[in-house]
Image (tube, rainbow, N blue to C red):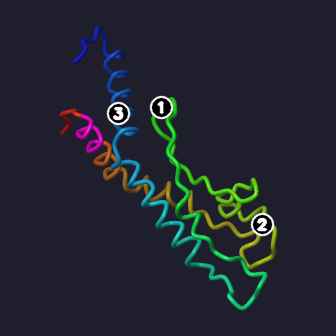
Amino acid sequence: MPTFSNMKQLEQYVNQMAKDSMLKGNSVKNMVIDTGERHVQSDVYDVYSPDPNNPKSYKRTGLLKESWEVEETLNGIEIYNSREDEGRNIPEIIETGKGYQFDFEYNGKPRPFIENTREELRRRESELTDALRQDMKSNGFNVK
């Protein structure tokens, strides 16, 4: 372990190791993505069922639930839904209810699956901390 001449250096080191652990590990990523997928199901899919008898009814692809990406950021990682269709940001459209190209009952009505995911993760902060702890352990750190 490196030596530190002040607390600021130690803090920077610990933050970097936490970030590296989140990038290399799977516990934090899986917790966030699993929570997001559950909110896609409950907040988006479960509240609207396409009409199979209407040829103009939206045909669900399932890609919203599957389109989660992880990117490194300055302070850690960003996990987001990357679903696009013809260059349109589908998560933003669903989240806000604005930008649909067809008329249906949720046009103009938000289905905030992303915000609901964030809120749930805030409520489960101790579990998220445990996930980070697990990622750090799997990266070789002795954390309690």
Type of residue at label 2? Tyr
- What percent of the width, then of the height, locates residue 114? 56, 58
- Circles 2 and 3, Cβ within 8 Å, touching? The answer is no
Q: Quadrant of residue 31?
A: bottom left
Residue in the foreground of this view, choosing between 16 and 125 = 16
- What percent of the width, then of the height, locates residue 27? 33, 49
Label 1: state its secondary structure.
Answer: loop
Marks 2 and 3 sit apart, C-alpha to C-alpha, by 40 Å
- Circles 2 and 1, Cβ within 8 Å, touching? The answer is no
Horizontal arrangement in the rendering, residue 80 relative to residue 30 (left or right): right
- Circles 1 and 3, Cβ within 8 Å, touching? The answer is no
Residue at image x 55%, y 78%?
46
Q: Quadrant of residue 44?
A: bottom right
Region in magenta: 133-139
Residue at image x 51%, y 66%?
39
* Residue highlighted by disc 2: 100
Q: Quadrant of residue 17?
A: top left
Q: Earlier in the sequence, mark 1 or mark 3?
A: 3
* Residue highlighted by disc 3: 18
* Residue highlighted by disc 1: 75
Label 2: state its secondary structure.
Answer: loop
Q: Earlier in the sequence, mark 2 or mark 3?
A: 3
Assess disc 1: are there few (<14), some (14-19) or many (≥20) residues with their C-alpha within 10 Å of its C-alpha: few
Image height of 66 relative to 104, above or below:
above
- What percent of the width, then of the height, locates residue 35? 44, 60
Label 3: state its secondary structure.
Answer: helix
